[in-house]
Image (cartoon, rainbow, N blue to C red):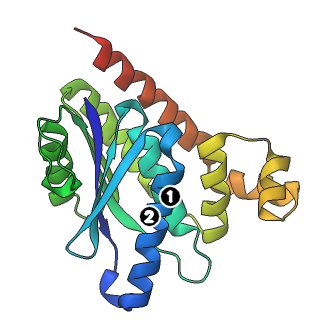
Amino acid sequence: MKGVITGDIINSSTLGKTGLKALTRTIKETTAALHPQGAVKVDFYRGDSFQVIVEQPEHVIQVAILLRAALKSQSRQPWDARLAVGIGEVSHLDKKVSLSNGEAFVLSGHGLDDIGKKRLVVKTPWEQLNASLDISTLFVDDIITGWTPNQAAVAYIALRDNPQQKEIAKLLQTSQQNVSKLLTKAKASLVRQYMNYYAGLIGQAIAQP
């Protein structure tokens, strides 16, 4: 069982070659920094689309949220992407992620095909879990879509490492009071509860015979 994220960059046609190159670099650097969360490989195809394999599927939702936070935290030109998360078996793992296949890839690909106006969807092999995820993810997606660059920057650090607010303030060279305000507006505690809750449920589902 693995987690797969299929992503589609929003408004990629307006970026130009320089902007698209900077955006893909951000995605590569973000996934490289998320190895403790299990992000193992990213691959780009069609110029504005990408896939990420997450070795530990219980962490795939966290990786997806952190990817969006990293993209949205760019102060000069905040970016965003539609992300479809799929959890399942992988029957073939190619050196190029986009040439791999299996249940996780199928669920992720279908999720992106059907994503519509949403920007985050999660599909698993367990129908009861999917019904719960569909509703909860709608609310979390709406929260993340509304993040400002400053809120996204604070949320990224908070949701990745869960440090003290004073540590976040030091990293971002701002006041602890400002960090507290940004975390509240970003509803970071609610997003963390969502991540942790479904990480637990996915872990339990995988562990069942």
Which quadrant of the view contains residue 151? bottom right
SS at circle 2: helix
In the rendered view, would you say 153 is above or below 125?
Answer: below
Q: Is residue 158 left or right of residue 112?
A: right
Q: As shown in the figure, which amino acid type bears the numbered disc 2? A: Ile
Residue 86's label in the rendered image is none
Seen at 65% across and 51% down, the residue is 157
Q: Residue furthest top?
A: 209
Q: Position of residue 124 (x, y in %)?
A: 23, 34
- Residue at the disc numbered 2: 27
Q: As shown in the figure, which amino acid type bears the numbered disc 1? A: Thr
Which quadrant of the view contains residue 112? bottom left
Q: Residues within 10 Å of mark 1 (few under 14, many from 20)?
A: some
In the rendered view, would you say 19 is above or below 89?
Answer: below
- Residue at the disc numbered 1: 30
In the rendered view, would you say 185 is above or below 188?
Answer: below
Quadrant of the snapshot with the N terminus: top left
Q: Is residue 202 left or right of residue 6?
A: right
Which quadrant of the view contains residue 114? bottom left
Can I make out residue 108 in this image?
yes
Q: Is residue 33 left or right of residue 122?
A: right
Seen at 36% across and 89% down, the residue is 17
SS at circle 1: helix
